[in-house]
Every structure is written in C-alpha cells, then in structure tokens.
C-alpha cells in the first residue's frame, strides 16, 4: 500500500489537510521551511491521493474519523490543524468531536458555513456532469479558475500539477466528496464554541469562499486571527506561499511557541 501521509521535522505538530480533488502533494513545498521548527504531517484524505482503498463513506465526519485514526497511529496527542477548502470542512468536523486535541485551527480558504442553495445545486450538477463525462473532462476547466487571473500565467506549472492530481482521483471519490460537501451541516456553532484559537486565511478574489462568507464567520471564535490577501484566489499556498506561510508561522508561535 502506498504511503498516505508525509511526516517530517520534529517538535510541536502541524497537521495539513488538502481540499477537494487534491492530495498531500499540495503541501510538499509549502511545508519544507516549517520543518525546521515543527513536525509537519500532511495526510491524504480518504479517496484521494494514495488513500483510495475501500472508502465506505465520503462524509466530513467519516473523513475526520480517518484523520483521528491516522493521528493516533502516528502518536499525535495535540496539534494545530490546517485545512484547505474541503480540508477545512473536515477540520471543523474534527473540532466538533476532538476539540481537546487541537492547539489551534487554520481555515485556509475554507468555511464553517454550509453551502448556499445555489452552491448545493451546482454540486449536484457537477456530480451529474462527472457521471456523464468523466473526471478528466471535469478537472480540465475546474482548476484554473481557482487561481486569481493575474497569477495564472506565472503559476502554469502549479496549475498543471493540480490538474494531474485531480485527474488521478477516482470517479467515486469525486462524486462522493461533492455530495458530502453539498450535504455537510452548518458548523458555525462549533466555530463559536471552539476553545482553541482560529486563524482564517482568505483570498480577496476567491470565488469559492467569497468576501461575504469570509466576513460572516471570522468574528465567531472567541480568539481569532484573520488574514485577507489581495490578488489571491483559492490557492494561497501557491499564489502567495511566503506570506501565507509566515502568517501561519506567527499564529503557531503565539499558541505553542517555536
């Protein structure tokens, strides 16, 4: 069986969860400078990357259970969890059940709010499209708009990498995750009650987490830090890796030191 996680560095633990049609590979370059100070673990969520064996359920709750099982195996008692997009939805499901394991949470272009009715409808249309036309035809036009238009030329290689990761995703994982994201509950209450600090990283030009959705949630936790980046879409770890990494590092230092 292929390795479904990377585990590098030593010290306090930062756990990275990728988004929809992504994999642990998303975090490879981003986490390297952090490994001098922290133990960084990046996981493949069930159905994605190398973690495609027998996926019983694609719900955010079942993915959070899989994350818990993996962290237990790796001996992780407490961590800061960083979730990109769908990984943030999984992080919120994890926080609801295992909040005591979290030093902090980073919602990286993500949200505790549910899908709007329009978004739910679009997810259902996407499921239908994937079933009729396949994963490759879905992924090809899907990836590029995740990046702010002015960054696309500069980040051609990164866009291509994400397309390759996406195209390798099994069809059942794509449709299963789309349905799971569509049907996930509102977890703004979890955000409100969570005991640990929360960092929000938002792109000012992110079509997936628009400004009004960002502003509707960042005041909810008792202790939160918010970072809005201009000329950035949904992929800040590629569009502005230094700025997003330094923000995450400062957040980690305020909670657990370096």
Image (tube, rainbow, N blue to C red):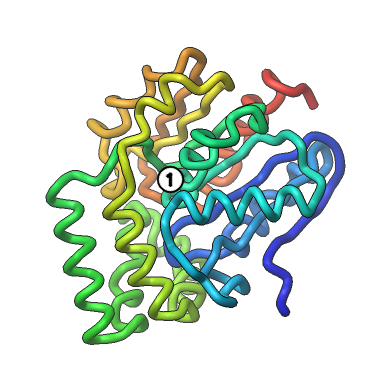
> Residue at coordinates 29% horizontally, 49% vertically from top-left?
208
> Residue at coordinates 37% horizontally, 17% vertically from top-left?
219
- Compared with 12, 127 (above or below) is below
> Left or right: where does residue 100 sit relative to residue 88?
right
Q: Quadrant of residue 190?
A: top left
> Left or right: where does residue 36 sit relative to residue 170?
right
Q: Quadrant of the N terminus?
A: bottom right
Q: Position of residue 152 (x, y in %)?
A: 38, 61
- Compared with 141, 185 (above or below) is above
Q: Position of residue 179 (x, y in %)?
A: 30, 62
- Compared with 85, 201 (above or below) is above
The residue nearer to you, when weighing 116 against 180, is 180
The residue nearer to you, when weighing 143 against 173, is 173
> Residue at coordinates 24% horizontally, 86% vertically from top-left?
133
- Compared with 198, 175 (above or below) is below
Q: Position of residue 182 (x, y in %)?
A: 27, 54
**Residue at the right extreme?**
10
Q: Residue under circle 1?
A: 89
Q: Quadrant of residue 163?
A: bottom left
**Residue at the top extreme?**
222
> Residue at coordinates 53% horizontally, 34% vertically from top-left?
95
Q: Position of residue 109 (x, y in %)?
A: 42, 42
> Left or right: where does residue 2 sit relative to residue 225?
right
């Amino acid at each position: 069986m292929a390795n479904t996680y990377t585990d590098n560095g030593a010290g306090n633990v930062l756990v990275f969860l990728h988004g929809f049609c992504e994999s642990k590979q998303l975090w490879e370059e981003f986490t390297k400078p952090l490994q001098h100070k922290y133990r960084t673990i990046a996981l493949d969520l069930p159905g994605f990357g190398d973690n495609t064996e027998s996926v019983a359920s694609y719900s955010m709750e079942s993915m959070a259970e899989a994350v818990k099982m993996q962290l237990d195996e790796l001996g992780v008692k407490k961590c800061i969890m960083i979730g990109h997009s769908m990984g943030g939805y999984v992080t919120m499901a994890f926080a609801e059940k295992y909040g005591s394991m979290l030093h902090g949470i980073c919602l990286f272009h993500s949200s505790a709010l549910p899908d709007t009715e329009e978004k739910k409808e679009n997810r259902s249309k996407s499921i239908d499209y994937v079933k009729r036309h396949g994963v490759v035809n879905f992924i090809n036009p899907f990836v590029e708009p995740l990046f702010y238009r002015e960054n696309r030329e500069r980040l051609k290689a990164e866009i291509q990498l994400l397309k390759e990761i996406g195209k390798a995703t099994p069809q059942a994982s794509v449709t299963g995750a789309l349905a799971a994201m569509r049907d996930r509950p509102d977890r703004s209450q979890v955000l409100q009650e969570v005991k640990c600090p929360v960092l929000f990283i938002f792109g000012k030009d992110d079509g997936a987490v628009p400004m009004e959705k960002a502003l509707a949630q960042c005041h909810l936790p008792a202790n939160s830090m918010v970072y809005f980046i201009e000329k950035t879409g949904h992929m800040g770890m590629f569009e502005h890796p230094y700025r997003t990494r330094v923000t995450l590092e400062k957040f980690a230092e305020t909670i657990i030191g370096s």
